[in-house]
Amino acid sequence: MSKYDIIVVGSGPGGYVTAIRASQLGFKTAVVEKEDLGGVCLNWGCIPTKALLKSAQVFEYLKHAGDYGLKVKEFDKDFDAVVNRSRNVADGMSKGVQFLMKKNKIDILDGFGKVLKGKKVQVTPGNGEAKTHEADHIIIATGAKARELPNLPIDGKKVIEYRKAMTMEKQPESMIIVGSGAIGCEFAYFYNSMGTQVTIVEYLPNIVPLEDDEVSKQLERSYKKSGIKVMTNSSVESVDTSGDKVKATVKTKKGEEILEADVVLSAVGIKTNIENIGLEEVGITVEKDKIQVNEWYQTNVPGYYAIGDVTPGAALAHVASAEGIICVEKIAGMHVEALNYQNIPGCTYATPEIASVGMTEKQAKEAGYDVKIGKFPFSASGKASASGAKEGFVKVIFDAKYGEWLGCHMIGAGVTDMIAEAVVGRKLETTGHEILKAVHPHPTMSEAVMEAVADAYGEVIHL
């Protein structure tokens, strides 16, 4: 039996980052992984989807080359090549994680990990004999998979989840996407750009329902303009996959409607990977499909920890990484600060992109704040006009009494690279005055943040 200081079960952006930080702090570390290093995010989520979206964006540029004074006589898409590029990007990143494991002298334990009593982990390879390893600290980072609805069973052919949507052998002519969170909206943009007829079905009143209402409405306008059919306040009640096409019965406010498509993509959230990993035997508390932890990610059983999608925090790659670092730094006896879950940025990488942090306008008002709202449209931005990307805006929300930056919401080109200003500003308890007086470079998209703040305080120049 091999003995470690720390064993991390799972090698996604939570697990592998945790293992590297543990190694940096001097712990003898191992990571357990049954598939590819990097987990879902690197192999099937964050990274390969961005590669697909970039191909779609380049294809869109070619379609609108004339808008930039350019003549492109002949061009077409190669769907197989687009998919292969995405897989190659993911493979390259996974090899990068292998290099980091080697560099940091972290042992990779290949196989399915199950936690045992007595601070042990059993690792069973796909075609080998189970081995047991021991550690002073065991960190569970097994992540999540696509959630399956009872009335929308996934068969991998006509009803699919995100993995299949990334590697389809043939581009479908039509697609129904159930759910309009980040995953649903990103695939809607990708397939629509490639020429697939896309319909989004969303149960709630707005698409991207966690975002500020104005952002949701702007994305809906943009999607409808690009030819995507958007059905809100609607739900898929059942699907019939017996024919050549799939028939979905959709319940709307006006009654039931039958939609036909080549394929239905279920994008209705995630289910944690906690089955058969030994939680019950060890006695680790689970509630509502999530492992219960304290602010340092300790479970109710000493020596066992959990981070990432298996815990109640936001199921985002950057959250999992931050949680893992805090967890091992606390184990190392460092002075650490608990993660502020109210200051976590969220991003959707469709076109236009969405990025946000903090409270929406509705949430701020419901919390009793007297608010100052500022908004700056990219149609008034010189950089956006020059780039041909005038869709969208930046919206900021401040507490009128003390100037606290309550929220920032963006929709437009490249905004996922801009939101960090608001995250850092809120972390430093920055007021609107400090953003106003910080000189922003011209011409840039980021000027819109300063201009939106100026609008909130009645000092906007370019509106």
Image (spheres, rainbow, N blue to C red):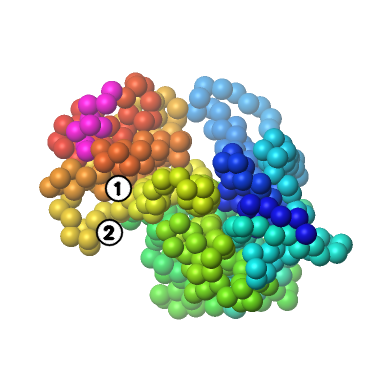
Marks 1 and 2 close (CB-CB < 8 Å): yes
Side of 124 relative to 341 (left or right): right
Name the side, left or right, on which 160 lies relative to 356.
Answer: right
Residue at image position (24%, 56%) is: 364
Q: Position of residue 436 (x, y in %)?
A: 23, 30
Cα separation between marks 1 and 2: 10 Å
Point out the tag, 1 or 2, that comes first from the N-terminus. 2
Residue 462 drawn at (x, y percent): 24, 28
Towards the viewer: 436 or 180: 436
Question: Residue at left 53%, top 57%?
Answer: 307
Tell me, yes or no, if residue 95 can be seen here. Answer: yes
Q: Does residue 395 appear anywhere in the picture?
A: no
Which quarter of the figure is the C terminus placed in? top left
Dot 1: element: strand
Q: Residue at x 22, y 62 (%)?
A: 366
Is 317 situated left or right of 35 in this image? Answer: left
Amino acid type of the residue that numbered disc 1 sits on in the rendered structure: Gly
Q: Which mark is residue 407?
A: 1
Q: Please tell me the numbered disc located at residue 363.
A: 2
Quarter-wise, where is residue 431 in the image? top left
Q: Which residues are magenta?
A: 431-439
Return the residue nearer the eye: 212 or 285: 285
